[in-house]
Image: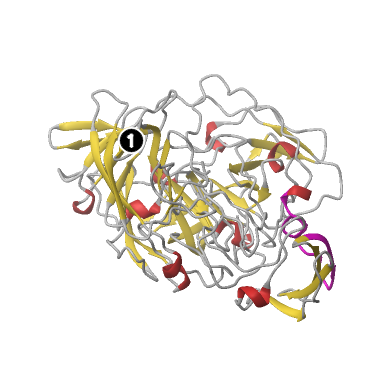
Amino acid sequence: MVRVLWSLGVLGLMVSLKGWAALGGNDLQVPQEGFPLTSYVPAHAASASPPGGIRQQSVETLQHVIVTEYSSHGTVFALTWSGPTLPDSSCFFGFLFSPVPTVSPEPPPAPGVLPDPHRPPYARSGRSCQWSHGSLPGLRLRPGSAACGSGPLSSWSGPMKTPSLKFFLRALIPGLFLALTACGGGGGGGGGGGTMTTAQTCNTLTVPATSIPTPFTASPSTTANQVPVTVEQYAAVNYPTMNLPYVTVQVCHGSQCVTIDHVIVDTGSYGLRVRADFPGISNLNLPAVTNGTAPVMECAQFLGGYMWGGVYQATVKVGGEATINPIPIQLVGGQNSFTPPSSCSSSGSNIGNLSGIGGNGLLGVGVFLHDLSPYYACTTNANTGSGNLALTSIVSNPVVAFSSDNNGTILTLPTIASTGQTTASGTLTFGINTQANNSLTSGYSVVPVPASGPNIGNFTASLSGQSGTYPASFFDSGSNLYFIPLTGIPTNSSGNYNPQSLQTITGTATSFVTPSNTAPLSFGLLDITNYLNGGNVAFNDSGSDNGATAGSADFGLPYFYGHSIINGLNGAQATQGSTSFTGPFYAVK
């Protein structure tokens, strides 16, 4: 799940950015605030205005559009612009002046379908492009975005969430669970990346019932099963990012492959999503997944937006591992032939682009095997295919399709300083008990999680200093912060925890599965504002109450530093000494 709070990014950063005020928001006080605008170049000086008068000032965007703001009593009441392109209305007009989308009632699940525990359908955040004075919105890749520009960070003012972005992807994501917003990155709020010249029909497809898989044990392997993971500032993303773990993957059709760098590892979502406009992807001519003759489109929904795109068959390679056969993946953004139906676009802004993701794709390697997002059969004629979608046509976790090392993953990141680092390097290891480097040793605390029912995919957490428990808890590398509601910990005006000295919280993770296993929990929280301004992007003590849900503890990427965390796939069997576990399960050391 990608869940990210961005300062500037597509996902809802926790950091404040000096930017242009939205309609209905506070005006921009450039001279008084004293920060240069690197995302917007002043075109004209602000006009002075007496109390009660009208203040006017203009800036030029990086796209050479001059935007003029008119304010009275500190509130913006009008905007004008001139230039070669239309500015992003969702950013400049502000949330209060945006049309309120009509949300269709959530359809009942198909009989026997297991809900995605980390992507509640139709969940959304109201923070997209809603800029407050001197700040940009935040996101959550389990992936909001200040993608309209970039600039120095003055305070940690908005939650940062990532792409997979739980992005609010707790696969957002329930990804970046990232609450993601893309301001000017290619979608704004509703388009699918293309335009229709003829009428289209998109019918919702019924996802097949998925039974609990037959338990399986992975065979011993000698395949190169580790790939490097890097947390860094990706140069192609024009805003500061934070806690985004990148790997490189290959997408292939036959013998022809494209190598895709800076793909976010999301242990809270399922399946591979890559940018349709990434160089070389279109040349692969990947076979489209169809329902009858109608192309299948997916609407991967996150708390702060959605990713719209077609489903295609591709061989996926990560390091030395490769899927035995082509599997369904999603190509997001680009020039899609179909625009998303209202049942998709009403979930927020279109974040299926470089700025919205914070990278070139999302690798969902969570504990479940398939992504049960809404799927559609889209055509420009009356033949829209049947209302059912085969399980083989659903975007799926590539790990289970590997020829070996296919029963889970281990994400390992190094211990870092509480003040953060400019980069951090770790490993993503495939397989459990298949090689010497992935043994489920006695050092791991194993926490099985339910494969169905109300607590699907979750454990319950108890934390020191907090009353009650958190029955909807999980580990998610796609969330770039801890998203946990806590009492007694100070926050800033945006809900980000900002204690001036390191606060350590301990607790216990307890399984709902009988017999109940436990794992110790320990993490820190600190005001990281100064260290963000210093250019650090890897933090192990960053958290937010903004976007947190009562009863839920989202242990995002900060928890992975100094730990190895195993995701045992649903149905996968692994032994620890004389004890056998069947996935889904987490294991932490």
Q: Is residue 44 above or below residue 587?
A: below
**Amino acid type at mark 1:** Ala
Q: Which residue is mark 1?
A: 461
Which residue is pictured at 81% across the width and 71% down the height?
A: 50
312, 550: nearer the viewer: 550
Q: Residues within 10 Å of mark 1 (few under 14, many from 20)?
A: many
Residue 72 figure quarter: bottom right
Residue 578 figure quarter: top left
Q: Is residue 91 magenta?
A: yes
Q: Is residue 205 above or below residue 89?
A: above
Can residue 429 be seen here? The reply is no
Q: Is residue 109 magenta?
A: no
Q: Which residues are magenta?
A: 76-95
Q: Position of residue 225 (x, y in %)?
A: 31, 55
The secondary element bearing badge 1 is classed as strand
Q: Is residue 259 above or below residue 457?
A: below
Q: Position of residue 275 (x, y in %)?
A: 60, 58
Which residue is pictured at 55% across the width and 38% down the height?
A: 394
171, 312: nearer the viewer: 171
Can residue 98 be seen here? The reply is yes
